[in-house]
C-alpha cells in the first residue's frame, strides 16, 4: 500500500514583527505570514489541500513525512506552579552564583588563565586528561540543564549530540520558539547558569579540599562561560539576543532593517570577535608561547 505523505503536526506563535513562527519535531523553525499560516491551518495536515509552492517550502524545511505515527509531539511549555518556582529559583541561583564568582576573583584568585595553568608546573598528559574530563563533565551538566528547562530530559539520547574530539555536546531545542518569553529565556540561559553554579560549588569545595585540579576546572568553566558570548556565531548569547528581540533570524540582514538594528548587529559581531580574541589571548596564546620556548 502506498503511504501518503503528511504534514507534521506543528505549533505556532505570533512574533513581535506580526509574522508567525511554526515549529515541528525534527523540522527547521519557519517564519511565515499570517496568510501562509491560515493556509496550513485550513489544510488539516493533508497535502492535497495545499498549493505546490507551500508544499515545496514545507518539504525543504522537514515538515513532510510518510510515517506520521513515528513522529513525537514537541514538548509544551509548562504553566504549573512547580515550573514557575523552578525557573525563578534557577535564575536567582544563577545571579547569586555569578556575583559570588566575580567576588571570588579578587578574594580567592579563581580566574585561572593559561599562564596560571603553566605556572602550576604540571604541564603534561596528567593535566591534559584533567582538562578533557573537566570539559566533558561540565559540558554534560550544561546541556542537561538545557534539556531540563526545554522539557526534553526524557529524550536525552535523541536530543543530545556529543562531539568527543571537541569535548563538547549540544542539544536541539528549536521548539522553545513557540513558548512565552520567560520559559524560553530560561531554556536558553539555563546552561550558562549551570556553568556559573558549578563554578561556585567548585570554589567552595576547593576551600575545604585544596588541589591544583580545581585550577583546571576554574579555567575550563570561565572559558565555557565566555565562549557563549561569541555573538558572531550561533551560541547561547546569540540565541538570548534573538529571544530579546523575539526574532529567530536576528543575524539575517534584511533590506527593511532600521539603522539602529544594523548598528546593533555590527556592534554585537565586533563584541563577539573581541570575546574570541580575549579567549585566545588568555588561554591559548600562553600555551603556544610555552611550547615554542620549550622546543627551541
Ligand atoms: Zn548552552
Image (cartoon, rainbow, N blue to C red):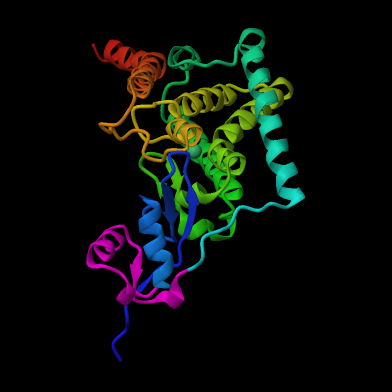
Decide: is 125 above or below 11: above
- The quadrant in which residue 185 appears is top right
x then y, percent, for residue 273? 34, 20
Q: Residue furthest bottom?
A: 1
Q: Residue furthest top?
A: 106
Q: Does 105 appear in magenta?
A: no
x then y, percent, for residue 205? 70, 27
Range of magenta residues? 45-71
Quadrant into which the C terminus falls: top left
- The quadrant in which residue 259 appears is top left
Q: Does 55 appear in magenta?
A: yes
Residue under the image location 61 percent in, 49 percent down:
148
- The quadrant in which residue 39 appears is bottom left
Count of numbered tags: 0
Residue 242 seen from this side:
yes
x then y, percent, for residue 127? 47, 27
| Viewer-proximal residue among 60 and 173 | 60
Decide: is 163 above or below 51: above
Residue under the image location 43 percent in, 50 percent down:
21
Quadrant into which the N terminus falls: bottom left
Residue 209 seen from this side:
no
| Viewer-proximal residue among 166 and 227 | 227
Decide: is 22 above or below 47: above
Left or right of 84? Residue 219 is left
| Viewer-proximal residue among 230 and 183 | 183
Residue under the image location 36 percent in, 53 percent down:
28
x then y, percent, for residue 231? 39, 27
| Viewer-proximal residue among 216 and 221 | 221
Left or right of 145? Residue 119 is left
Amino acid at each position: 500500500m502506498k503511504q501518503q505523505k503528511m504534514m507534521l503536526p506543528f505549533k505556532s506563535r505570533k512574533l513581535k514583527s506580526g509574522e508567525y513562527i511554526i515549529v515541528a519535531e525534527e523540522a527547521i523553525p519557519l517564519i511565515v505570514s499570517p496568510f501562509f499560516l491560515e493556509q496550513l491551518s485550513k489544510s488539516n495536515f493533508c497535502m492535497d489541500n495545499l498549493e505546490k509552492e507551500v508544499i515545496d517550502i514545507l518539504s525543504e524545511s522537514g515538515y513532510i513525512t510518510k510515517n506520521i505515527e513515528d513522529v513525537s509531539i514537541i514538548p509544551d511549555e509548562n504553566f504549573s506552579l512547580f515550573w514557575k518556582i523552578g525557573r525563578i529559583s534557577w535564575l536567582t541561583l544563577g545571579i547569586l552564583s555569578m556575583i559570588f564568582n566575580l567576588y571570588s576573583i579578587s578574594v580567592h584568585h579563581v580566574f585561572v588563565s593559561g599562564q596560571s595553568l603553566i605556572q602550576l608546573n604540571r604541564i603534561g598528559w596528567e593535566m591534559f586528561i584533567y582538562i578533557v574530563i573537566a570539559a566533558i563533565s561540565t559540558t554534560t551538566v550544561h546541556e542537561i540543564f538545557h534539556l531540563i528547562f526545554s522539557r526534553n530530559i526524557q529524550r536525552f539520547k535523541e536530543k543530545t549530540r556529543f562531539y568527543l574530539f571537541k569535548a563538547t555536546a549540544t542539544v536541539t531545542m528549536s521548539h522553545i520558539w513557540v513558548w512565552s518569553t520567560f520559559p524560553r529565556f530560561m531554556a536558553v540561559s539555563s546552561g550558562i547558569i549551570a556553568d556559573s553554579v558549578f563554578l561556585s560549588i567548585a570554589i567552595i569545595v576547593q576551600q575545604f579540599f585544596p588541589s591544583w585540579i580545581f585550577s583546571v576546572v576554574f579555567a575550563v568553566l570561565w572559558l565555557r562561560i565566555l565562549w557563549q558570548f561569541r555573538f558572531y556565531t550561533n551560541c547561547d548569547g546569540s540565541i538570548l539576543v534573538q529571544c530579546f528581540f523575539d526574532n529567530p533570524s536576528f543575524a539575517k540582514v534584511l533590506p527593511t532593517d532600521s539603522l539602529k538594528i544594523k548598528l546593533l548587529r555590527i556592534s554585537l559581531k565586533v563584541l563577539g570577535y573581541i570575546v574570541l580574541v580575549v579567549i585566545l589571548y588568555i588561554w591559548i596564546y600562553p600555551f603556544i608561547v610555552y611550547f615554542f620556548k620549550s622546543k627551541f
